[in-house]
Amino acid sequence: NAGVTQTPKFRVLKTGQSMTLLCAQDMNHEYMYWYRQDPGMGLRLIHYSVGEGTTAKGEVPDGYNVSRLKKQNFLLGLESAAPSQTSVYFCASSYSNLAQPQHFGDGTRLSIL
Amino acid sequence: SQQGEEDPQALSIQEGENATMNCSYKTSINNLQWYRQNSGRGLVHLILIRSNEREKHSGRLRVTLDTSKKSSSLLITASRAADTASYFCAILGDGNKLVFGAGTILRVKS
């Protein structure tokens, strides 16, 4: 019973490099989310998806892209990493709508040098 | 801003004592949710309270909501060392997106 799985757990990048964070859920949830968590701040929504093939911008979308080609997977891409993107990234999912509780993965700790 | 503001920022208590955390917000809400985050882990949902509800219980947790004061409180009774974590309130407002506060760090000393 995995729930929400994020890979990788840790990563160090150099400025300008690109990478993709992977999120997989096995709960058949329609909605999936990407957040970033920075010290002293709450989680901030980057992008979200209300179903396979759909994505939408959240509060802080600049510098990130996402794709939801399969219902169970939600990918977050950084095309050209910047030090300001150093953060802990969390993926979450919910069953059918934004009002329902969200289930979180354990995060990806990303450092951009 | 829809963001909830938790108070206090940090709380340290002895095992067996009660812990109370508060969340204030500025806009109308659809529901308010409380989450727990253990160090190095993801958030775990605790309780959801709708705008037309005033109180909900789950085990040792009690959540109240006062929409006239735009505030909510989370009470953990008979705290245990395992309750040591960060606690976040999250507001679902008219924008229909969940907005998280900065959290309260709870330390329960054994």
Image: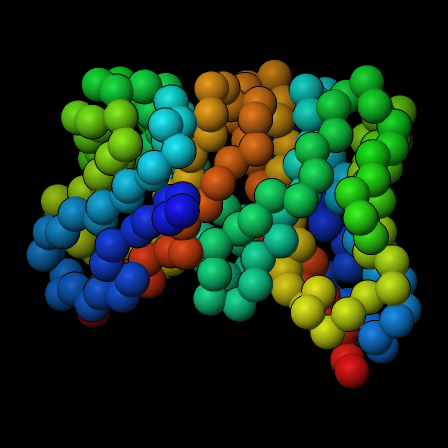
Frontmost residue, A83 versus A12 = A12
Count the marks. 0
Q: From the viewer's side, name the closer residue of A61 and B34.
A: B34
Q: Viewed as shown, does residue B87 lie left or right of A15?
A: right
The image shows residue B70, relative to residue B35, as above or below, that is above
| Residue drawn 37% across the image and 48% down it | A2
Q: Quadrant of residue B33?
A: top right
**What is the quadrant of the N terminus of chain B in the image?**
top right
> Can residue A4 be seen at all in this image of the molecule?
yes
Can residue A46 be seen at all in this image of the molecule?
no
Vertical position of residue A32 compared to residue B37: above or below: above
The residue drawn where x is 78% and y is 43% is B58
Q: Position of residue B35 (x, y in %)?
A: 63, 47
- As drawn, the residue found furthest toward the bottom would be B110
* Residue at (22% x, 48% y) in the render: A21
Say which residue appears at 72% left-offset and 50% top-offset. Answer: B6
Residue B15 lies, with reference to residue A46, above or below; the image says below
Residue B11 sits in quarter: bottom right
Q: Position of residue B44 (x, y in %)?
A: 56, 49
Residue at the front extreme, as displayed: A1
Q: Where residue A91 sits in the image (x, y, percent)?
A: 37, 43
Q: Which residue is outermost to the left?
A: A17
Q: Is residue B57 left or right of residue A47?
A: right
Image quadrant where residue B31 sits: top right
Q: Quadrant location of the C terminus of chain B?
A: bottom right
Q: How is the image coloured?
A: rainbow
Percent across and percent down for residue A35 are 40, 43
